[in-house]
Amino acid sequence: MKKAFFFLVAVMLTGIYSVKAQGQGGGGFQRRTVEENVKAVMEKLADLKLDKDQTAKSDTIFTEYFKARDKAMDEMRNGGGGGDRSQMREKFQKLGDDRDAKLKKVFTDAQFKKWKDEIEPSMRPRRPGGGNGGGNN
Protein backbone atom coordinates (compact mmCIF):
# COMPACT_ATOMS: atom_id res chain seq x y z
CA MET A 1 0.00 0.00 0.00
CA LYS A 2 2.83 2.39 0.87
CA LYS A 3 4.52 1.69 -2.46
CA ALA A 4 1.34 2.54 -4.37
CA PHE A 5 0.91 5.77 -2.41
CA PHE A 6 4.51 6.93 -3.02
CA PHE A 7 4.25 5.95 -6.68
CA LEU A 8 1.07 8.04 -7.03
CA VAL A 9 2.72 11.02 -5.33
CA ALA A 10 5.77 10.72 -7.60
CA VAL A 11 3.57 10.60 -10.72
CA MET A 12 1.61 13.65 -9.57
CA LEU A 13 4.76 15.66 -8.81
CA THR A 14 6.27 14.73 -12.17
CA GLY A 15 3.09 15.82 -13.95
CA ILE A 16 2.92 19.11 -12.09
CA TYR A 17 6.58 19.83 -12.76
CA SER A 18 6.30 19.10 -16.49
CA VAL A 19 3.21 21.29 -16.92
CA LYS A 20 4.88 24.13 -15.03
CA ALA A 21 8.06 23.81 -17.11
CA GLN A 22 6.11 24.15 -20.35
CA GLY A 23 4.48 27.42 -19.36
CA GLN A 24 1.38 28.73 -21.08
CA GLY A 25 2.96 29.11 -24.50
CA GLY A 26 4.08 25.51 -24.67
CA GLY A 27 7.64 26.65 -25.28
CA GLY A 28 8.43 28.27 -21.96
CA PHE A 29 7.40 31.76 -23.04
CA GLN A 30 4.33 33.61 -24.18
CA ARG A 31 4.38 35.60 -27.41
CA ARG A 32 3.58 39.26 -27.14
CA THR A 33 0.63 40.64 -29.05
CA VAL A 34 1.04 43.13 -31.89
CA GLU A 35 -0.19 45.87 -29.56
CA GLU A 36 2.35 44.95 -26.88
CA ASN A 37 5.17 44.96 -29.45
CA VAL A 38 4.09 48.35 -30.84
CA LYS A 39 3.84 49.79 -27.33
CA ALA A 40 7.37 48.56 -26.51
CA VAL A 41 8.80 50.12 -29.68
CA MET A 42 6.96 53.39 -29.19
CA GLU A 43 8.36 53.63 -25.66
CA LYS A 44 11.88 53.24 -27.04
CA LEU A 45 11.14 55.84 -29.73
CA ALA A 46 10.56 58.43 -27.00
CA ASP A 47 14.29 59.22 -27.28
CA LEU A 48 13.66 60.51 -30.81
CA LYS A 49 11.28 63.23 -29.57
CA LEU A 50 8.73 62.60 -32.34
CA ASP A 51 5.97 65.12 -32.97
CA LYS A 52 2.31 64.02 -33.00
CA ASP A 53 2.25 63.36 -36.75
CA GLN A 54 5.47 61.32 -36.64
CA THR A 55 4.17 59.38 -33.64
CA ALA A 56 0.89 58.50 -35.37
CA LYS A 57 2.61 57.46 -38.59
CA SER A 58 5.23 55.43 -36.71
CA ASP A 59 2.53 53.64 -34.75
CA THR A 60 0.80 52.67 -38.01
CA ILE A 61 4.05 51.52 -39.63
CA PHE A 62 5.00 49.33 -36.67
CA THR A 63 1.48 47.90 -36.36
CA GLU A 64 1.58 46.86 -40.03
CA TYR A 65 5.11 45.49 -39.63
CA PHE A 66 4.34 43.36 -36.55
CA LYS A 67 1.13 42.00 -38.12
CA ALA A 68 3.04 40.98 -41.27
CA ARG A 69 5.90 39.53 -39.21
CA ASP A 70 3.53 37.50 -37.02
CA LYS A 71 1.71 36.22 -40.11
CA ALA A 72 5.03 35.12 -41.64
CA MET A 73 6.07 33.45 -38.37
CA ASP A 74 2.75 31.59 -38.16
CA GLU A 75 3.17 30.40 -41.75
CA MET A 76 6.65 29.18 -40.92
CA ARG A 77 5.47 27.35 -37.79
CA ASN A 78 2.57 25.73 -39.63
CA GLY A 79 4.75 24.51 -42.47
CA GLY A 80 3.48 27.03 -45.01
CA GLY A 81 6.89 28.62 -45.34
CA GLY A 82 8.29 25.57 -47.08
CA GLY A 83 10.79 25.01 -44.28
CA ASP A 84 13.54 26.82 -46.17
CA ARG A 85 15.42 29.02 -43.70
CA SER A 86 17.02 31.17 -46.38
CA GLN A 87 13.61 31.97 -47.89
CA MET A 88 12.23 32.90 -44.49
CA ARG A 89 15.29 35.01 -43.71
CA GLU A 90 14.78 36.85 -46.99
CA LYS A 91 11.11 37.36 -46.19
CA PHE A 92 11.87 38.81 -42.76
CA GLN A 93 14.65 40.97 -44.24
CA LYS A 94 12.20 42.35 -46.81
CA LEU A 95 9.66 43.12 -44.08
CA GLY A 96 12.33 45.04 -42.15
CA ASP A 97 13.53 46.85 -45.27
CA ASP A 98 9.96 47.89 -46.16
CA ARG A 99 9.40 49.13 -42.60
CA ASP A 100 12.65 51.11 -42.69
CA ALA A 101 11.80 52.66 -46.07
CA LYS A 102 8.52 53.92 -44.61
CA LEU A 103 10.21 55.15 -41.43
CA LYS A 104 12.82 57.02 -43.45
CA LYS A 105 9.99 59.10 -44.96
CA VAL A 106 8.64 59.92 -41.48
CA PHE A 107 11.83 60.48 -39.45
CA THR A 108 14.44 63.16 -39.93
CA ASP A 109 17.89 61.93 -40.99
CA ALA A 110 19.17 62.22 -37.42
CA GLN A 111 16.15 60.35 -36.02
CA PHE A 112 16.50 57.57 -38.58
CA LYS A 113 20.22 57.22 -37.86
CA LYS A 114 19.50 56.91 -34.13
CA TRP A 115 16.77 54.33 -34.90
CA LYS A 116 19.15 52.19 -36.99
CA ASP A 117 22.23 52.57 -34.78
CA GLU A 118 20.76 52.44 -31.28
CA ILE A 119 17.08 51.60 -30.99
CA GLU A 120 16.61 48.86 -33.58
CA PRO A 121 19.55 46.76 -32.33
CA SER A 122 18.16 46.93 -28.79
CA MET A 123 14.84 45.50 -30.04
CA ARG A 124 16.37 42.25 -31.34
CA PRO A 125 15.84 39.25 -29.10
CA ARG A 126 18.94 38.01 -27.34
CA ARG A 127 19.94 34.46 -28.15
CA PRO A 128 21.06 32.22 -25.30
CA GLY A 129 24.61 30.93 -25.38
CA GLY A 130 26.30 34.23 -26.20
CA GLY A 131 25.88 33.96 -29.97
CA ASN A 132 28.80 32.93 -32.19
CA GLY A 133 27.21 29.53 -32.72
CA GLY A 134 27.91 28.51 -29.13
CA GLY A 135 31.49 27.41 -29.92
CA ASN A 136 34.61 28.55 -28.14
CA ASN A 137 37.17 28.94 -30.89
Image (cartoon, helix red, strand yellow):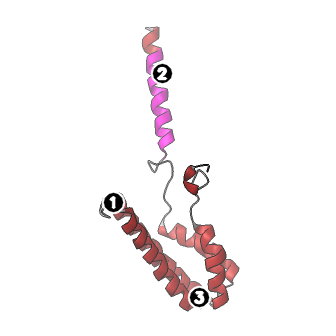
Horizontally, residue 61 falls left or right of residue 71, namely right
Determine the residue positioned at 49% across, 27% down. 13
Element at badge 1? loop
Crowd band around label 2 with a 10 angstrom C-alpha radius: few (<14), some (14–19), many (20+): few
Q: How many numbered discs sit on the rendered protein?
A: 3
**Which numbered disc flags the more N-terminal residue, 1 or 2?**
2
Position of residue 43 measured from the top left corner of the image (x, y, whole percent): 64, 73
Q: Nearer the viewer, residue 85 or 53?
A: 85
Determine the residue positioned at 51% across, 77% down. 62
Position of residue 133 measured from the top left corner of the image (x, y, whole percent): 54, 54
Determine the residue positioned at 64% across, 83% down. 113
Determine the residue positioned at 44% across, 47% down. 26
Q: Are marks 2 and 3 in contact (CB under 8 Å)?
A: no
Position of residue 95 measured from the top left corner of the image (x, y, whole percent): 44, 76
Q: Main secondary structure of the magenta part?
A: helix
Residue carrying label 1: 83
Range of residues picked out in magenta? 6-23
Q: Amino acid at mark 2?
A: Val
Residue carrying label 3: 54
**Which numbered disc flags the more N-terminal residue, 2 or 3?**
2
Q: Amino acid at mark 3?
A: Gln
Residue carrying label 2: 9
Q: Are marks 1 and 2 in contact (CB under 8 Å)?
A: no
Horizontally, residue 1 falls left or right of residue 48, namely left
